[in-house]
Image: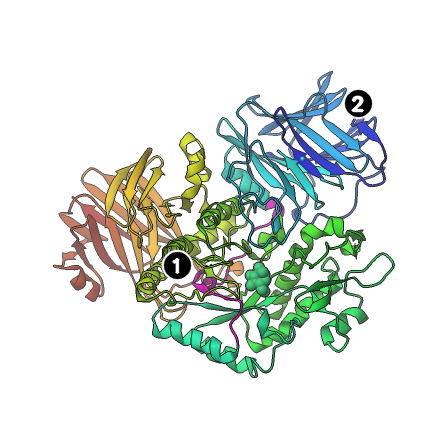
Amino acid sequence: MSLKFPVLMTLFIAYAPLFAGFEFLGNIKSQAVHLNRVEFKTDNALFNIYVYDDNVIRFRYTNQKEFSAMPSYAVISGLPAKAAFTFKDDGKYFTLATKTLKVRIAKSPGRVSIYDAAGNLINADEESFGVSFDNDEVRCYKKLLPGENFYGLGEKSDDLCKTGKEYTLWNTDFWAYDDRTDKLYISIPFFYGIRDFKAYGILFDNTYKSHFNFGAEKGELDYYFIYGPEMKKVLTSYTNLTGRAELPPLWALGYQQSRWSYFPEAEVSALATNFRTKRIPCDVIYLDIDYMNGYRVFTWNEERFPEPAKMLGDLKKDGFKVIPIIDPGVKADTNYFAAREGLAQDLFAKYPDGQFYQGEVWPSWAYFPDFTKAATRTWWGANLARLLADGVAGFWNDMNEPTVWGTHFPDIVQFDGDGYPTDHKRIRNVYALEMARATREGLRKHSDQRYFVLTRAGFAGIQRYSAAWTGDNVANELHLKIACRMSQNIGLSGIPFIGSDVGGFVGNPSERLYIRWMELGAFTPLFRQHAAWDTRRKEPWTFGVDVENAVRDFINLRYRLLPFLYNEFYTAHKTGWPVMRPLFFNFQDDPECYRTEIQDQFMLGDNLLVAPVLSETDEFKRFYLPEGDWYDLNQQRFYSGKQWILQAVPLKQIPYFLRAGGFLPMQAVQQYVGEKTITETEMLIYPAGESSYTLYEDDGISYEYEKGVYSRTQFTCQTATDACKITVSREQAGFKPLRRNYLFKVISQHPPVKVSVGGSPLSLVKSAEDLYQKAEGVYYATTDQMILIKTPDRRDFEIKIQY
Ligand code: GLC
């Protein structure tokens, strides 16, 4: 199925099975209005419009006798039983209207145009082509409106703006891809159209290979039109449909170390010891394929890892969580329990004649579990429990496009389709999604603690089960740039937990490239270093002491930022908004934010701007600060916004800026999450006008937050010419943070004359050191425009700074 936007029009193509010949949709012959939808019959097809929400309308077409009953893999939210809309016959047209949208349905021929409430055209079928059926395909041509631009489609390695280009969605393992590679591991048939700074989104709910010309090979034409006009609203509505990410375990936001492969056991413990003795924080160690016995999933190589439970237990005491790789292929070996069980219980994908399919992957010939079958998912989850019992902390799903070597995975291979039998053509793009589902469901059954799941392949909705990484990248400058923009692009598609192999998977980075990549990594949602077996060692200390020291600083900074980052994951969990965002996501009305070079910058949340240096040799960086005032966190300088800035960028510095009105919670460095009881939260505030921030906290490891066991503390800051007032109030106190005090760091261009908390004046101490030693109730004004205030943590209090 495909979706095309050629120069004058946009086109979606989908295939309708069993149909031969070409037909247009034809004229509307009849209509029936229901509480939540309108059903039309046309000369050649059935056409339904469903009202999901004021701003979310689904359009569905088939030239078959009825619509497919197969449930969607991407969309998990149901159609409400009743929706608020009106439907009128206006002669040549029908008009369906909600509070936000007006859909005009031309009768002859059947065509759809969508307007906002003010009557502006947002999206329309192309007049001559509209919707058509060509043999197996269903197509939909849309008008390309003047000035319209396109964004989205998840894992694509080219520029963020997709206008004028063509894309195919077909999950593909592409070793050492580049910025011209089209098909990659993850397929997300969701994009944004933006015109006059107003955004809509279209989710094309079809799992077949799909073409977006700015054009699918089969299936129904079934799409959800989502109106904003804010991108934030579009993404919230999109994730209402496809689901949101759970809160990850807090430790998964720490530094993660991987390599193909760490073995035997002695090497893993040496690695762990190195981190701790060198005082480089690290939470996670990965085990790549060599931990297994002959690449058989759910097993250990007993020579290399004779006592896995003991090893994992020892590592745990030292704060390390271990994540093993899991590939879907089950070695075709009848002496192997997993193969025997799968065959006996009929859990693997088969040829139409009933023979089990075998493809070649790491263990040589392997069977492929049919994850679209409930029994397979349950079995898979139960087998994961073997490794969980040994003490692993999650799973790293790889090769799940699914990849096979030498040939393509045959299209005729049959899958259960959860009771709607179908073939590889329909299932390929959701194979990894269903494998991740099996994993997550297995984990939830196993225990009530949060585990970490990482996947290479996926489809719309993968965020419900897993974090993702961007596959087999290369240690070069181009890939450093790709790492930055592709993570933003994937975030725009509802997947907040994303990162790339820091340092590059294939090949060897120079020292400079390595440092720059670690700097970027410290600010990406997933901070994981990984490298291929034939590359040089890339652990933080393997480039010499100078690099080690620089890298330690960035990993330390990452740990300082954990409260802030965790809060952004909470925002993602509640709203679907990315943790790492393109500038235009926050500053949608600013044309500068759409420029191509801007993709080398990003926002973390609403107020932290990061301008990473994505070149080995650059000593200067030109970057843009949008509207507002900005505080340079490296150089302690103020900048006003809406300007481009050229700055010298020393190798060991990554430019990052806090926006006026912003809050940045931080905490002390730990060698791993949970190493220390953190009793102090540092709150950096850049006062401007009136602003507020809500800090979310919970235990970071259980699902108790789903039952309200969390806390939300609201901070406000109001400024006047001669004063600044900060209030703190705990809005939700289901969880009691271990905090005893706050260290406020208030950015201020003047020294204060008086600082008081709850009306009582604080005493001024002589140095920052003095302040750090005092338990609370003191302040200090530094020379670098900062007022430091130490207060106890109370449920509600107020700080007043007088200038
Ligand atoms: C694939 C993965 C890579 C892994 C390798 C060996 O190439 O993308 O991350 O290290 O397989 O398992």
Residue 66 locus on image (x, y percent): 83, 39
Residue 637 locus on image (x, y percent): 23, 44
The count of marks equals 2
Q: Residue furthest right?
A: 353
Q: Amino acid at mark 1?
A: Leu
Residue 404 lies in quadrant: bottom right
Q: Confirm if mark 2 falls within 8 A of ligand 1.
A: no
Give, as a single range, the part of the protein colored magenta: 240-263
Quick check: marks 1 and 2 in contact, CB under 8 Å? no
Give whichever of discs 1 and 2 has the lower sequence position: 2
254 drawn magenta: yes
Residue 717 locus on image (x, y percent): 30, 45
Residue 287 lies in quadrant: bottom right
Q: Which residue is mark 2?
A: 27
Q: Is residue 158 shown above or below 353?
A: above
**What colour scheme was applied to this rendering of the protein?**
rainbow
